[in-house]
Amino acid sequence: MQLKHLKTLLPPQDGAAKVTCMAWAPNSARFAVCTVDRVVLLYDEQGERRDKFSTKPADSKYGKRSYTVKSMAFSPDSTKIAIAQTDNIIFVYKIGEDWGDKKVICNKFVQTSAVTCLLWPAEHSIVFGLAEGKIRVANTKTNKSSTIYGTESYVVSLTSNASGKGILSGHADGTVVRYFFDDEGSGESQGKLLTHPCPPYALAWGTNSIIVAGCDKKIVAYGKEAHILQTFDYSRDRSEKEFTVAATSPSGQSVVLGSYDRLRVFNWSPRRAAWDEASPKEIPNLYTITALAWKKDGSRLCAGTLCGGVEQFDCCLRRSIYKNKFEMTYVGLSQVIVKNLSTGTRVVLKSHYGYEIDEVKIMGKDRYLVAHTSETLLLGDLSSNRLSEVAWQGSGGNEKFFFENETVCMVFNAGELTLVEYGNNEILGSVRTEFMNPHLISVRLNERRQRGVDDNKKLAYLIDIKTIAIVDLAGGYNLGTVSHDSKIDWLELNETGRKLLFRDKKLRLNLFDIESGVKTTVLSFCSYVQWVPGSDVVVAQNRGNLCVWYNIDSPERVTMFPLRGDVVDLERTNGKTEVIVTEGVNTVSYTLDEGLIEFGTAIDDGDYHRATAFLETLEMCAETEAMWKTLSKLSLEARQLHIAERCFAALGDASKARFLNETNKIADSISKEYGGDGTEHYQVKARLAMLDKNYKLAEMYYLEQNAIDEVMEMYQELHMWDDCIAVAEAKGHPELDNLRRSYYSWLMETNQNEKAGEVKESEGDCMGAVNLYLKAGLPAKAAWLAMSRDELLASSDVINRITAALIKGEFYERAGDLFEKIKNNQRALDCYRKGSAFRKAVELARVAFPSEVVKLEEAWGDYLVQQKQMDAAINHYIESGCSSKAVEAAIGARQWKKALHIVELQEDRSSAKYYLKIAQHYASIQEFEVAERLFVKGDHIKDAIDMYTQAGQWEQAHKLAVKCMTQDEVSSLYISRAYELEKEGKYKEAERLFVTVSEPDLAITMYKKNRMYDDTIRLVARHHRDLLQETHIHLAKELEVEGRFQEAEYHYIEGQDWKAAVNMYGTNDKWEEAYRVSKGHGPASAHKQVAYLWAKNLGGEAAVKLLNKFSLLETAIDFAAENRSFDFAFELARLSMKEKIPQIHLKNAMFLEDEGKFNEAEVEFIKAGKPKEAVMMYIHIQDWSGAQRVAEAHDPDSVADVLVGQAKFCFEQKDFQKAEAFLLRAQRPELAIKYYKDAEMWSDAMRICKEYLPNKLGLLQEEYEKEAAKKGKRGVEGMVEQAREWEQSGEYARAVDCYLKVKDSSNAALLEKCWMKAAELSIKFLSREKAVDVVQAVGPRLVQLRKYSAAAELYLNLDLIKEAVDAFIEGEEWNKAKRVAKELDPRLEGYVDQRYKEHLKNQGKVDSLVGVDVMAALDMYVERGQWEKCIDTASKQNFKVLHKYIALYATHLIKEGEAEKVLGLYAQHGAPANPQNFNIYKRLFLELMSLRDRDSAEAYRMWADLRDVLHLLCENLTKSSEANSPAHEDFEQMLVISHYYATRSAAKGIDQLSALAAKLSISLLRHTEFIPADKAFYEAGLAAKAVGWENMAFIFLNRFLDLADGIDEGTLDALDHTDFQDTDIPFEVPLPSKLHVSVERREEIRDWVLTVSMDQRVEQVLPRDERDTYEASLVAANTGIRSLPCVITGYPVLRSKIEFKRPGMAANKDDWNKFLMATKTTHSPECQDVLKFIAQWCGGLPSAGYSFQ
């Protein structure tokens, strides 16, 4: 920063006249200086002195010189100045806002010692220091002061930080103390900060450092916690004196210190984090600087001196001009002053965090500031001076700013929208959106204050193109989402943010109510829409209408005006709202009803005083009255009673106005007495409830205060005696009886006999009540009472009186009820009939007079028709069988479907007349098909045709007409109608009629007659497409005659005759138009021709100019020459392009030649310098002498050409000798050869070639051969002939080549013959190599011809054995191939076999392949999935092969989940002990174990097969090398398990063996490492339960449930094994992959277990045997001895046992005998099979002996 002297504000004096203090106002508008004589001078911003005032002593008796002013400061609002004086006082002067305002002392603070320094950092708080060392604060609001802290040392200086929230005080002993009112989260310490070596008179607090200086000529910079950052020592500088004063810039980044004749400037460097000293400001003769003051915007610094001078300096780092409109003054790194050069207004832009400001931009119509720092973004509104600084991570300047909203800036960056409210240093909100258009974002920030809403900030934006989100920015939550079915192109919230308007691409305007979430479409085809500012009124345009919604809460109520233009703007000023509309070139304004706008807004905002004030200005009319009514209702709700009274007075409702007036008096008196507005007082609340007719509420308010008399008074006043008596009764009022008497006498006085009767009735006096009711003329009430009291019914006199009164009063129904009650049915029926009480009459008739029911139903229907209740009458007519009346009633009731239904049910013709009426109805609702059917049914076909005609459905009408009219009638009807329509100008309708009757030509004529050419063309295009061009041309010609060239041109172009259009324009000298048409519609060069014609028309120099203009001069010359306009061409060439003249001569010559003027042409050719052309001309006409003459005279080179020409002519004349002579003279033998070739005289050609061009003889020979080949059959014959010639002449190589070249696919015999001949010749006469080549070429060709044997023989002639074999193979002659291979080259036998196998494979002949290669055949079966065939074939091979394929098939079946089929395979074919099969056997076993529902008797066969397969496997293993291996042991275990399963299935089939089956299920639990554990426990539990072993059943099923839960969780870690301690049931079992029981079954088990667990009888332990061990465990718990398992049950064999021959096999005797007995008694084949197996397995049965028969 640099200081630049601007001006002297106060000139210095000759002697010492010290400026004691100075101060700048915070608003920078005023500057105050206090001189030595204690006068305060006031300057404006420009430095002009505008005012002054004198200070006052604390006590006037001491005089003006009794004090000095030590310090002063402006208040934060710049309207007051505080003055610190040495006479122990601070005065606060109010100086006002304008210059010249009276200066008044508004506060004074007396102290105990001199006030030495003073600051005014915050509203109402002045901080000052005293000579006694205290720092105090004075409160201007309370007029009191208090001590902040005290020291023992004189206060020499006082300064604050940039925000004014912290202060530093410097003391005479060098101490500097820091104090914070608010440390703003910095965490810096308070209290004594440092001790400086000398008194710190110059004390400054910068952003990052504190600077202290004094009389020791040193400047020290301290850090935030008082460590020394830098020292600037000037003690050795002789010119430097002590430092007296310091000032900090408002940004805190610069400090200036004053000394003698010098100002030293220090700037903070953020990069170095240190102070940089700028060059000091030296001012000779300035003397000591006593005061410094820095303007609050940082742009000016003022210095006061010892001699009373005040100098002003400009402070800035740099200045720049922006767009010639703004001046940017950088007064610090983080502070910029922006000045508008046109208006002079200034804004101070400052980073509150001290960051360096980069570049400042002014955007948005020069109103808004944008600036970046490294960490923040600064935004500001220049017009309102509201600035914001928000945290912002740099994004490379890619942000986009939108300033459409005056209160908030929208910043888009990388798909994110950020909102910054001007004047707020926090980001208002951020949302993700891709839509940057301001029309698709709406922000509303507190734009219209509403009652009860403090902070109203809403945002609406697009999430995607069809979805709007609405966000509450103050609360930071989502208010709602609007999903729409179409793309949205505009949206805007109203000012209160409660409603959202949006428009979609289909121009539909929608309203969304944010509170209710209701979306309404309010307008279609909306081209303009806007909210009226300051209101909730909407203005929109729909095509030709202006639509205004004064009350948007009722979107259906819209006010519309017709418009002739487009709405462009909306203006609301000076109490008027105008819609600006452009109508063509004019602008028109439409004024809206301001009353509706203003009133509605005031009501919405709850500002009823504003609404009243507005209504006062309006004349009374219907609309105004409605507004007063609305206001009265709302003001009553809001308890604004004075406004409500005014409303009712305005409405002329005197009673309510008077009542409210009295209520207001009560409220006002209570308000005076108790404060508040008085509306909460019970009397006021009760009166308001009365006004609302809510008397019970009023009663409640009174009774709450125990004001019973007031309640009763209220009810009596209102004559509500019942309520009054009820209150008196409830409260036990002493006046109750009197009240009742008063009530009855009042009723009688006022002739209220009915009420009196009710009183009598309630007292139980029925007769009296009846008399009173009859007296009151209420016989019905008397009748009700009589019907409810038997004693009254018994009195015939009473009944007669009542019925007479009822009949007299025509209460027939009630009389009927009474007659029915006393069983007088006839009188009752008559009364019901008279009283039209038909329902009761019918009910009574059904019981008492059944014959009358039908008549009554009809009468009921007639009555209902009279009452216009047609709907109800229909059914009664139907009931009474009056169908015609029913139809009429249905038609009358417009129940058309019912009427139609009734009519269609009727069989007689009388109903036909109704068809017309019904049909007319259906026609009116456009259900034409139904109507047509009815018209036709009712013979009204003409009406049906009229219906379709009127509806414009001519096709339908025509279809119908054709059915019932002749074609001529239809045509004449339609054509006559069409002519009528034509006269009415309804051409389209007329056209449709003409077309309907296939007379489009009449329509075309009509349009043509009316000069409606577009329609003419349209119809021609549709109906006579072939005549379309012709029609266009015809119309064009007509228009051309009328001089309507533009239209004619259009039709010529459409008729594809652009030339006619050009001619038309050319004929009429409109060459420019002609040129335009040719360029636009002609081919590429057409416009050039037109330009040419135009030029030709002009001629001379004008033509040249025109052609030059179009750059067509050369082209035009060429064109003229081409078109034989040689004169024009020569004219143009002579005038402009002389070099073109020979060219024109040439063209002229050619033209003359074509014309047959050869002599003239010769002259022109020679002029053109083209004599050769003349020669060629004569050659062409065969004038050889002329040609010779010109050639010899003008072009000797052409003589040869003449000779060639003559030769050609001779050839054509077949004079070959002459021709040959001419060509040889011309030295052109090659031409002679060519001509001979063309004449197919090959021998002459070869003769000439031999003589003159021997080197080309070979080529000629080749060409001859090609030519022969080309000629097809003729050529082939020639070729064969040639070959024979070669052969006869001994040229065998050539003969062979020739034979090989023969190719005629249509003659296979010839080909074979030729090729065989070639092969024979090569074998006989050519070398072996050549012969081999020929045979190898011929062989494949013969194979292609399917001559396999011939090819093979050729190959064999040359010992090409392999090729011969291949030829036989190709022909599928396998035996020959084998024989050749065998006899001539045995090495090829394998090759032939291999090829044969491949052939069979490829042909899919697997059955044949079996005989050749079984393994390959088997593999093919596998590939094709033909497993049965594969196994069948393999079974015929050896055992190893069979089991290989069985293993493959088994693997396949297991994958497919067909384990039972695998079992069948092994059961059928045996189970070898191959280790590679072990996995299959295990997998088979496990798969079968996992099958569900296989524990029944029916499953026996499967388990028996598995058992037998495993038994066979184990026997095979015993004999193999795998004997006693772990695998063998596993299979033995599996055998045991499968035996148990099989035995269990056998036992299940016999009732007496159920316990045996249960034991087997329980025994299987010890094998749960093989069997799925859940299945094993489930089956064991159910088996135990079935035989009544509930303990075991409970434990096993409980274990099953635990396992099931474990399977669901995927782990069995949580299982409790307590129940199975000391048993051989394993704990560690595999986790089953899935549950083997259905979920329903599991839940049944769970319910049973729960039930049993509640049962005290069931012991939850497993049963034990004599070993004190679980009875089914093989291992004894105490001894560890293992018992043998029983072969029948699996239980341990303990005492009585049966042993078998095979060691380790035993059975419990009881179980064995039981099983044997059951087998004997039942003859069960399954049990017999089990015993047979045991015999095999255990080495025979015990000696007991048992026969299986």
Image (cartoon, helix red, strand yellow):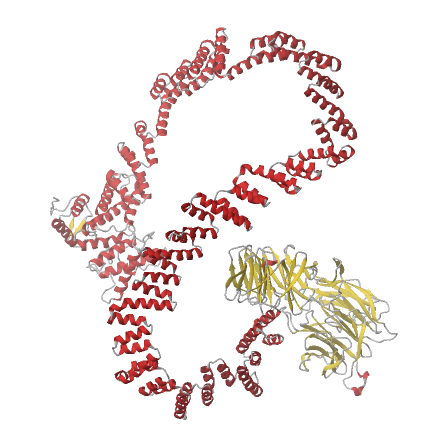
Q: Quadrant of the C terminus?
A: top left
Please identify the quadrant where the N terminus is shown: bottom right
Question: In the displayed structure, does residue 93 sit left or right of residue 1677?
Answer: right
Q: Is residue 946 above or below residue 204?
A: above
The reply to whether residue 593 is visible in this rendering is yes
Q: Position of residue 1112 (x, y in %)?
A: 72, 33
Q: Is residue 758 above or below residue 1726?
A: below
Q: Quadrant of residue 1739?
A: top left
Residue 451 visible in this rendered orientation of the protein: no
Labels in figure, total: 0
- Is 836 in front, or is 736? 836
Which picture quadrant has residue 1139?
top right
**Where's residue 17, x and y in %?**
84, 76
Q: Residue at x 56, y 58 (%)?
A: 503
Q: Position of residue 1235 (x, y in %)?
A: 60, 13
In the image, residue 1035 lies at what x, y percent? 61, 40
**Image point (49%, 13%), residue name:** 1279
Which one is nearer the viewer's eye here, 1736 or 1412? Answer: 1412
| Vertical placement of residue 1320 versus 80, above or below | above
Along the viewing direction, whichever of 1152 and 1660 lies nearer the viewer: 1152
Left or right side of 1708 for 1376: right
Q: Residue at x 56, y 38 (%)?
A: 1028
843 and 1458: which is toward the camera: 843
Q: Residue furthest right?
A: 14
